[in-house]
Image (tube, rainbow, N blue to C red):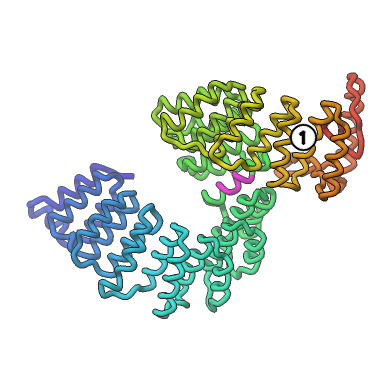
Amino acid sequence: MFHRSSLRRLFSCLTSPTSQARKRTNHLTPLYFLTILLNQCSTFNHISQAHTFMLSRGLDQDKLLLSKFIHVCSSLGFKDYAFTLFKLNQSPDLHLYNTMIRSLSQSDSAGDAINLFNNIQFAGFRPNTYSFPFVLKAAAHLSNVEVGREVHGQVVRLGFEYDIHVSTGLVHMYSACRCVIDARLLFDEIPQRDVVLWNAMVAGYAKVGDADSARDLFGKMPERNLISWTSVIAGYAQMNRADEAIVFFRRMQVEDGIEPDEVALLSTLSACAQLGALDLGEWIHSFIDKHGLHKTIPLKNALIDMYAKAGNIWKAFEVFENMKSKNVVSWTTMIAGFALHGLGREALQLFNQMENEGMKPNDITFIAILSACSHIGDVDLGKRYFSCMKSCYNIEPQIEHYGCMIDILGRAGCLREARDEVREMPFKPNAAIWGSLLSASRISGDVEVGEEALRHLIEVEPENSGNYSILSNIYAAHGKWHDVGKLRKVMKDWGVAKVPGGSSIELDGKVHEFTSRDGLHPSFQKIYEVLNEINEQLKINGYVPKFSGGILEDEGFIS
């Protein structure tokens, strides 16, 4: 933490004309003083004071000191200021070039980093083992594989192809540009690999969603660390294979005794949210508090999301309320959580509070708020927010926002208006749009619109059996049994298999998954004994369900 009094005392020692002050400081170098100053900086005002100190002593001409200043300045987020100082220097050396390229490489100014790299040789220098990794990070940030390949050519020409740091940068660049095959070919050619290089390749597979290849390579690693485990956990979470992500999270602690960091916890919380694994999510919450990680906003946001999706919406709101600092993701996640639980009024109130506190919503916030409007069935309010996106916040509605509006109209029974919205929107409707319209036709019982929606759905996702079932239920509701039969024949002829329903439950820290007509669970007999008891109780209470194949069936639910 920055201590203003400490900085004042340091400045007084540096500027005091008294002999006593000079005696206390004359054995120390300017680099030492400047390092202390820069380590205390946390605001632009502090940076300005340190820069003034440099200028008053001509230290801005010292390449090493200027490089240190630019690095700290950039790390605090003042990259434009740092870049201006770099450009004012008349004769930057290679170290200064590398520092500036590094500072710009993972920002919106990554293109400037590439231009600086290209200027290195024009300035009479030769890129070294630091230059290449930094510019490769810039290419990766921009997903510009063409630039990456050009740099790769220079790497080979200058003889750096077996430098472990440069090779790791190349593997990361190709992976970031989704050229994972190129990354693996390069990886296999490197004779000496350290754990960082292995991690880069594992993370590359995870990034493109190839969690199985990431796991296989992980199993071959001669040495593993926290990043190795986290890459696989993140890969599984990203691919919605939450149960496997949680298994790896537990293995990491049991097999290698590694404590998770913020990144591992974020990925695991995402998996908990997908599965509704509340017990593990609560353990992670306790771990965060115990290790003092509560100041990390992304972790708090992930906790809000986990609690909301795991069913404890008021615990999610408690986490939200206790946050000392919130960003737009915090507000959006909480609003989306309320909407998910059907608490539309609460979501709208929170959105109003967000606006009153000066927090500017983004496009995801409006998806959440439009979803809330859908839950409360307020078409006029939904239209107003949809219009407000552009008029108040200059946010262009995307296809997801049109999908929300179609859902609002459909749920409210305005089916024809919803269909007109689909026809008139400036995007080609996707499966989600047509699916929303099909679901709305089931609510309204409109066969014509339902048939139109299914025709388009067959084009984009012909193997989704749920779409056929919805239209089949619409036909059945109108007594069109002949059409029901024709639809089933189409499904049979096209090989569309009905996907069985499924559910999951967390018990004693383990998530159990169930699929209808699945007899593989080790507690199969006990589970169905309980289902039979439920069946008997329902009969006693006057409700007579059909019990067949281990599941309760109701008319229209299972055909």
The quarter holding residue 116 reads bottom left
Q: Quadrant of residue 166?
A: bottom left
Q: Residue at x 49, y 44 (%)?
A: 293
The magenta span reads: 266-271
Q: Does residue 21 belong to the magenta stretch?
A: no
| Horizontal relation, residue 19 to residue 496: left or right | left
What residue does disc 1 label? 470
Q: Is residue 198 visible?
A: yes
**The one of 32 and 124 positioned closer to us in this rendering:** 124
* Residue 269 lies in the magenta stretch: yes
Q: As shown in the figure, which amino acid type bears the numbered disc 1?
A: Ile
Say what secondary structure mark 1 lies in: helix
- Expressed as whole percent of the image width and height from the top left, the position of residue 462 reads 74, 47
Left or right: 437 as drawn, with respect to 401: right
Residue 34 left/right relative to 234: left
User: Which quadrant holds the C terminus?
Assistant: top right
x and y percentages locating residue 244 in the rendered image: 68, 52
Say which of 438 and 176 sits in front.
438
